[in-house]
Amino acid sequence: MPYVSNEEAKAAVQERAGEPAAQGRLSRILDSDMFHSFLRSKVTVVAAIGTFILFLLAFLAPWVAPHNPFDLASISILDARVPPVWMEYADPRFILGTDDQGRDLLSGIFYGMRISLIVGFCSVIAAAVLGISLGLIAGYTGGRTDAIIMRIADVQLTFPAILIALLIDGVAAGVFGSIDREVFAFYILIVSLALSFWVQYARTVRGSTMVEKNKEYVQAARVIGIPAIIIMIRHILPNVMGPVMVIATINLALAIVTEATLSFLGVGMPPTQPSLGTLIAIGNDFLYSGEWWIAIFPGLALALLVLNVNLLGDWLRDALNPKLR
Amino acid sequence: MNVLDIKDLKVEFPGRKSVFVAVNGVDMSVEAGKILGVVGESGAGKSTVGNAVIGLLQEPGHIAGGEIFLHGKRIDQLPYKEKRLLRGRKIGMIFQDPLTSLDPLQTVESQLVETIRTHLPLSGKDAQKRAIELIDAVGIPNPEERIKQYPHQFSGGMRQRVVIALALCAEPELVIADEPTTALDVSIQAQILELMKKLCAERNVAMLVITHDMGVIADITDHVAVMYHGDLVEFGETTQVLGAPKHPYTQSLISAVPRPDIRVERFPVVNYIEEAGTPQKQIDISTHWLGKSRDYEKVTGPLVQIKDLDMRFETRGSIFPSRRKYFQAVKKVSFDIQEGETFGLVGESGSGKSTIARLITGLYHPTGGSILFGKTELTSLKNRKDVLTMRRQMQMIFQDPYSSLNARLRVRDIIAEPIKFHRLASSNSEVRQIVDDLLDHVGLGAAAGQKFPHEFSGGQRQRISIARALATRPRFLICDEPTSALDVSIQAQILNLLKDLQEELGLTMLFISHDLAVIRQMCNRIGVMRHGELCEVSDCDQLFEAPQHPYTRELLELMPSMELLSRANLESA
Amino acid sequence: MIGFATRRLLQAMVVMLVVALLAFTMFRFVGDPINQMVGIETSIEEREALRERLGLNDPIPVQFARFVTQAAQFDFGTSYQFRQPVSELFAKRIPATLELSFTSALFALVVGIPMGIYAGLNRESAISKLFLSVSLVGISLPTFFIGILLIFLFSVTLQWLPSFGRGEVVQVGSWWTTGFLTASGLKALILPSITLGLYQMTLIMRLIRAEMLEVIRTDYIKFARARGLPDRLVHFRHALKNTLVPVITITGLQLGAIIAFATITETVFQWPGMGLMFLQAVQNVDIPIMSAYLLLTAFLFVAINFIVDILYFLIDPRLRVGRP
């Protein structure tokens, strides 16, 4: 209905504020309401910068880390369990101290973050591709296909992601045997994370697709005679991507946490390719003997990474939700 | 003495870049027992006036100047708590959409009783008694029983009656009704308006009715205030303002209102109204792509023949066939459309008129009957090539200008899609040229192609929809309520455009609307629908002057009378 | 009501059957069960005899039917690592997990709901913003790291609370053991239940806040304000009750999740529950325990969902009372 009280005034404000139409993509982005809401929220700006720096440190780990924790020649067991520099018996070479094998903790954290992020990104992409495709198909075709896909999703949704990942990992270990497990750990992790997270995308995309499907622009395309697959990809997909971006961001944080948890529980990344979770698991054994830094520093790095990504996701959700503006 | 006095009211909404003045120095007043109508198109600020009076302006909007008096007492500067006590007690409010105005989890009784007891010192028993009296007074039969029910157990019209009862709970002196009948069907609208008029007189309540609908204004108001972009352009007695408008905006607004009693060839377009589809480069239809190769195979007899069309939807699925429930949307409907004519379908919501449009275009598949287009039976088409040939010949224009265009595509790509898909042009540069010409021809200008749909207003978007529909070079155009979401002045322009196009291109049209007055302006023959059935088909003039079916007569009687409205600027057909 | 409940019950049974099929597939096809049960020195003939005796040569549907019948009687076979019936192993550990989950759920609800309501109603207040920031930190900290931090702070550094185990437990009835009745049992519960409940608490708080904000914007809330109803009625009678409908569904799911997340907490605190046993089973590929755990948790989730659906039905008259 076009005659809604204050909304019309708002629409008019926006219409007038919109002129003159900004030229060029960049200036349009810089002029958008979204960019302004971004700048207005100081926390978000800080989170964005923080995320950027952490990503940079992680992906450039081989160049920015002071040591190479995988270079066996440079590691000495004599340097094991050195405390951080501000404590007694510290070694200035190791700012945050070393772990039980004498590896520099700071470098370990950079490299670990890199592995955590790679696993996170790969699993988010895999889950999104799977979930979006199934969600589009279920939402657009409806009927039996929809019922089958959504029943599977429902059953899976009753189980938390971590449990599914654990089960898949256990089954994989049974199938591959425990020696191959180390080789395949990375892929098993991504498969199990993707299989535990696709449901969210599928449900959201299905919901939005069912709304979009009944909108008149889709009907107009059907009246023209455009086939279903092109309507799904060209017309519906771009219109349902907003919520998907929000889920993907929050999911990245969740995937990193879940990966860390699995590694901490000993079924994720092996100690030969330690992620942040693996590092914490190693350090956990030394917590009681006073060498707290081995567990706490990787843990703080993990928390910082996840917090920054979550802050971005939170802002994105509010910015894309027109109801909460 | 006036119940409500508004003096030089100014309401502002601070935006990111500028302050939007929604209401700019407005004066109006209303006496007890009288109804004041506030009329205007979207963006006029009429709802904002109502919200300012009751103190419910949405943040960051605020009253930036002026005064509001209730019975001579100034109320716009009262503290929050005192303002709250005015609401419901002294000022009642009726909202537009009865389906969302009531709390779905509380019975009607508990909502009434809590409101009564908030304002009046009554015991639970007395409040309950009063609630039943109120429900009876607003014309709901069986009040003792109905009051125990939940909102979802009432129909839309009945819910609006409940909303009115809630507004009247504590005998307020003033009732503000914001588009009280916009969400309702014509027949329900008439009943609700009559009820409001009756209650206003009986209870000596002053009423402020905010609406976009001249019919409502003509029907029930004593005074009227006409607003335009935040300004009050005219204020006076309803008969005087509607019959002899002084301000040019009021004049143009009134001449743009379609009426059931006279048929005009073209609506007068008065310059006062914005975006009047400035004439762009016109294309010569006889030589242009759009007019060329319109040599569809000739048909003898009607172009579209619909016979015994049936459509039912499953409303409850079950593995047991006996437990399934169906909704019969279209029942045994038959009619013909001749080549070159405009056939109108009119009916209330749920009468099945839009379903018929979707059945013809193939969006739904009928459960029975046949649709003959020329010589082709559409319901049994299997071959994809044949389907596409048929699709190309018929196009549709939809109701909602906001959702009928894909927000993620540029206008140019939206219009090019059908041309490319049906391979109607030989090169990309030709497609480009055609798109530019089409945009010119519908009055937007070729430059519009660069932009995205959200950069346009409702009327402009509807022009884009029309350009897209023309892009397959159709011979049959279905218009499904093409103007019901638009303001009257914009509606007049779009209807003019459709008339011009039909004449130039010799289009056959199926025009669907709930609005008899619009139907009268557009159609040669008209079918009246109710509950999925076709009651009557007759020539346009005959339908309005000598309706055959009792339902048609009822619909015509319920239409708000437009006799008050000035006839200046109108040339009858 | 009865029709509704039966329909839901049927759906729940279908879900359980699907899960059973999964558990059975795992049980039967991941690794060779015979290899896991016998030593290396067992001869091929003996293996075949055992295979025949266990019915592993029967048609697959028959095996599945037997699996379901046995599972329904709590017979999940024998653990590969412990060489004991799985049901006995679980019976010993279920009380520990349920007590931990219950305490955490209580903590999450009692703290999370009021915080959510407050933050939803006072969107701009400083306390709401504080709640929101804290909740974001709560969501960002992985459960196991919260556990480690708590242990480091309260057990290692301050030495106030124990870092592992259930403390002293008391036998109640024939098989239930409780930590609720002893001081050391209660003390041992504190850290694990905070660890486990914190994430759910923040989630519930954020959910209620978001739902409240949505409901506050609806027409019927605006209309309630326009009728001059006091804020107390508008907020608690109209807004909160409408918020509850979606909140109950998701809260139900979250409570189910607590039982699964207990796996992590039990590992960090060496809590002798079924989650810890499950994790050891995953590490040692002890398939019977894994499939039994899958079935048990699925049963608990399905039961919780069923209760939630019934609650939903009782709250929302649109489901309960038909149109005229």
Image: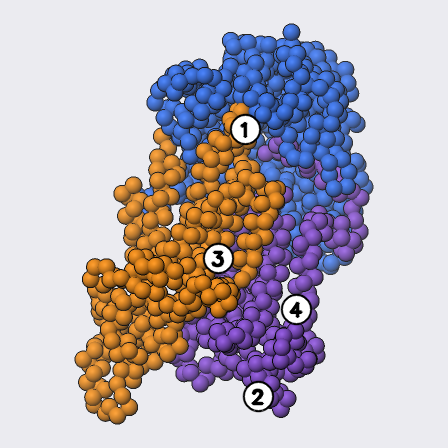
Chain colours: A purple, B blue, C orange
Give the Cα separation between the discs numbered 2 and 4.
30 Å
Reading the image, the residue beneath label 2 is A77
User: Label 1 near label 4: C-beta < 8 Å?
Assistant: no
Q: Amino acid at mark 1?
A: Arg
Provide residue C17's location: percent of width, then percent of height. Answer: 30, 62
Left or right, B476 with reference to A45: left
Reading the image, the residue beneath label 1 is C225
Give the numbered dot on residue C199: 3
Provide residue A68's location: percent of width, then percent of height. Answer: 64, 83
Q: Quadrant of residue B525?
A: top right
Q: Quick one: SS at disc 1?
A: helix
Count of numbered badges drawn on the protein: 4
Give the Cα separation between the discs numbered 4 and 1.
48 Å
Q: Quick one: SS at disc 3?
A: helix
Left or right, C193 with reference to A302: left
* First in sequence: mark 3 vs mark 1: 3
In the image shown, does B338 or B62 lie closer to the viewer? B62
Mark 2 vs mark 4: in front: 2
